[in-house]
Amino acid sequence: MNHELSHHDAEPPPFWRSRYAVGLLVMGGIATYFLLSEHRAHFLGALPLLLLLSCPLMHVFMHHDHGGHGGGHGHHHGNEPMSTPPAASPTPPTGDRP
């Protein structure tokens, strides 16, 4: 059996696994270090503002699973089975307390 693979048939690795991405991450880490070490007072002064800015960003990014505006929460997408609501628990009769 001949199991040789040519270089033309092999897929290139994804970008984040390439040597360029590793170099980009290293250079970004060095730039971040020098930016924070030289401008620490500016960065720490902006932290309260960054905290306030993170609230709307978290709201936008954490609500992406709710679907579009027109359908509400009750619609389903494509061939996904609709979930059945949980069975209602029987309510105890009122006035018959022991």
Image (cartoon, rainbow, N blue to C red):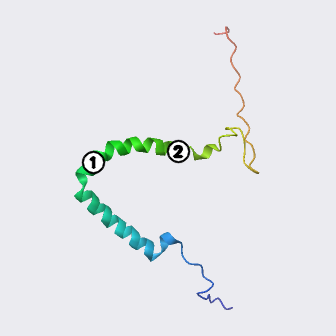
Give SS at disc 1. helix
Q: Amino acid at mark 1?
A: Leu
Find out whether the residues at labels 1 and 2 contact each other: C-beta distance under 8 Å. Answer: no
Residue at the image position 44 percent from the left and 71 percent from the top: 21
Inter-mark Cα distance, 1 to 2: 25 Å
Q: Nearer the viewer, residue 80 or 45?
A: 45
In the displayed structure, 36 sits above or below 94; it is: below
List the residue tagged with mark 2: 60
Residue at which label 1 appears:
44
Q: Which residue occupies 44% across, 76% down?
A: 19
Which picture quadrant has residue 20? bottom left
Q: Answer left or right for 52 relative to 71.
A: left
Q: Nearest the camera: 97 or 13?
A: 13
Give the residue furthest to the bottom.
2
On residue 36, which mark appears?
A: none
- How many numbered circles are shown? 2
How far from the left and from the top, in percent, is residue 55?
44, 41
Q: Residues within 10 Å of mark 1 (few under 14, many from 20)?
A: few
Q: Is residue 49 above or below residue 95?
A: below
Front residue of 94/58: it is 58
Q: Where residue 81 sits: x, y (%)?
A: 75, 46
Q: Residue at x 70, y 34 (%)?
A: 86
Q: Residue at x 52, y 44 (%)?
A: 60
Q: Secondary structure at mark 2?
A: helix
Quadrant the C terminus occupies? top right
Q: Residue furthest top?
A: 95
Q: Of marks 1 and 2, which one's residue comes earlier in the chain?
A: 1
* Near-viewer residue (55 or 94): 55
- Residue type marked 2: Val
Residue 82 position, x and y percent, is 74, 43
